[in-house]
Amino acid sequence: MDVPLEFCIIDSNKPSDLGTLTISCYTRSELVEDFEIAVITGDYEKACRWASELHASGKTDIIWDRILNKIVPQYINKANPLLLQWVWSRFQRYQQICELYRAKYRHEHRNNQEVRNIIVDVVVVVSTSQKMEIEPVKVRVKDLDSKYYCDIMNSGDITCDDSCPDEVCFVLDEIYNLKFTTDRCMYWYEWLILMERELAKKGHILSCIPEQCNGVNEKYLDDWIWKIWKLILSQVEKTNNVIKKSVRTLFQIYKWKFTKSAKRKKKYLLFTAFCLLSENINWRCKVIQKPITRIQVISQINFFYSDINSNTPDMGINAIDYYRLVAPNILKKGKSILNNQNDYLLEKTLTRGRRTEKNTKGGNGGKGKTKRKKQTNDRDNKTRRDKLDFFLNAGMPTSQPLKSIFKEIRDRDSDPNSYSDTKTIRF
C-alpha cells in the first residue's frame, strides 16, 4: 500500500454521507473559512492540518477552488507572479492521479502518498509566499447612468461590434483605451457586472455571439466575458514569452469549472491578467520562498492523517477487510496501488482467490481444451500460512500494526472459529 497502514484513513463512509460535516465531525463551512484565514495569514501548520481534514473527508476540490480562484489571485498575484503557474502544474498532476481511480473510490486517493504530498506542498508554498492583496472596487447603481457614460453613448464614439451589445462594446473600448490599467479596468468590469444585474431585473440579457472556447460548456459561450478575454489574449501576443505563459495559465484556470455564477468568484484571475499586462513585475521572484519549511512539513504530513484517525468516531470497517476487499478494487482496470515487489507479494498473500492450473492440448484429441483444477481450502490455507510465516520471520521492514494483521490472518486460517468478523484492529 502507498501509505503505511497506521497512517491510512480507513472509513467505510462515502463523502456524501458526511453531509455538512467533515470526517472528524467539524462543520465544513467553518473549517473552510479557518483554512482560508490560515493560508492568508501564513499559519502554514494550521493550514496543512485543515487541508488534511478536507482531503480525508473527500472535499479536495474545495482546497483547489479556494487556492486557484481566490487566495493566489486576490492575496498574492504580482507579489509572486509565477506562483499560480506552478500551482496549476501541481493541480494537473493531481488530476492525472485521480484519473487512475474508479469513480466509486475516487476519495480513496487520500491514502495515496503522492496526492498527500502535492496538497501539502501547495498549501505550504502558498501560505509562506509574500502577499499583496488586490483591493476590491465598488460601483454604485447611480454610476450606471454617469455623465461620462451617457456622453460617450450619445456621441456614438465607440467601436461598434454587431456581435456584442452596446454596453459590452463600451467597456471593451474603455479597457483597450486605458491600456489595461488595473484599477480602471477593474472599475469597468464591476460596472458591467452591475449593469448586467440591473438589466436582468428588467428581463434583458447581455449576451453576445458565441465564441469558440475549448473546455467551456456550450451554454456559456455567449457570455460577454469571453470578449474581454479575447481582447486580453490578443494584447498578450505583443508581449514576451513569460507574460504569455502566465496569462494563458490564468485563462485556463478561469475556464476550469466555469459557470455564470462563477464570474464573481473568478474575477481576481481577470484582475491579475490586467496587472501582468500593465504594471512592472518582478519576474525574478522565487516561487518557493521557504524551501526548508516546505521539506520539514511534507516529511511530517502523515502524522496529520494519524491524528484524524484518532479523532474519527467510527471507522465502520476493520483494517483487514479494507486491505483485502477495498484496496485491490480502487484503481481502474484492476491495477495495483502497491509500488514495490515486497508489497505486491504481501497483497497476493492477503488476497484469497482461486488458483487454477491450465493444461493445453492434453488427452482431448488434440483440441487444446483448457482444464482448470481447484486447490483445496486446506492446501490454500497452508500455503498462505507459510507465506505469512516468511514475511513475519524474514526480517523485512514491516510496521508493527501490519505485523499484527499478518498474525491475526495466520491464526484465523489455523482456527477460523477463533476469529470474529466484527473485530477491528486499532492503531
Image (cartoon, grey):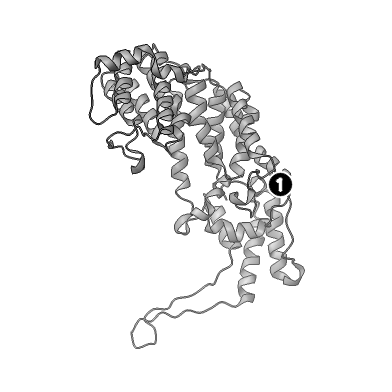
* Residue sticking out furthest to the front: 202
* Residue sticking out furthest to the right: 418
Relative to 122, say whether 93 is above or below.
below
Q: Nearer the viewer, residue 106 or 364?
A: 106
Relative to 424, say whether 42 is above or below.
above
Query: Does residue 317 appear to the left or right of 366 in the view shown?
Result: right
**Number of on-image labels:** 1
- Name the residue type under label 1: Thr
Where disc 1 sits, the SS reads loop
Mark 1, other Cα within 10 Å: few <14 / some 14–19 / many ≥20? some
Q: Nearer the viewer, residue 347 or 310?
A: 310
Q: Nearer the viewer, residue 120 or 21?
A: 21
Residue sitting at 67 percent across and 57 percent down? Answer: 317
Q: Quadrant of residue 223?
A: top left
Query: Does residue 236 appear to the left or right of 420 in the view shown?
Result: left
Residue 300 in sight from this viewpoint: no
Residue 412 in sight from this viewpoint: yes
Q: Position of residue 204 (x, y in %)?
A: 37, 34
Residue sitting at 32 percent across and 16 percent down? Answer: 174
Q: Nearer the viewer, residue 59 or 316?
A: 59
Q: Quadrant of residue 146?
A: top left
The residue under label 1 is 312
Q: Position of residue 64 (x, y in %)?
A: 51, 35
Residue sitting at 63 percent across and 24 percent down? Answer: 43
Q: Position of residue 334 (x, y in %)?
A: 47, 59
Q: Quadrant of residue 309?
A: top right
Query: Does residue 172 appear to the left or right of 70 in the view shown?
Result: left
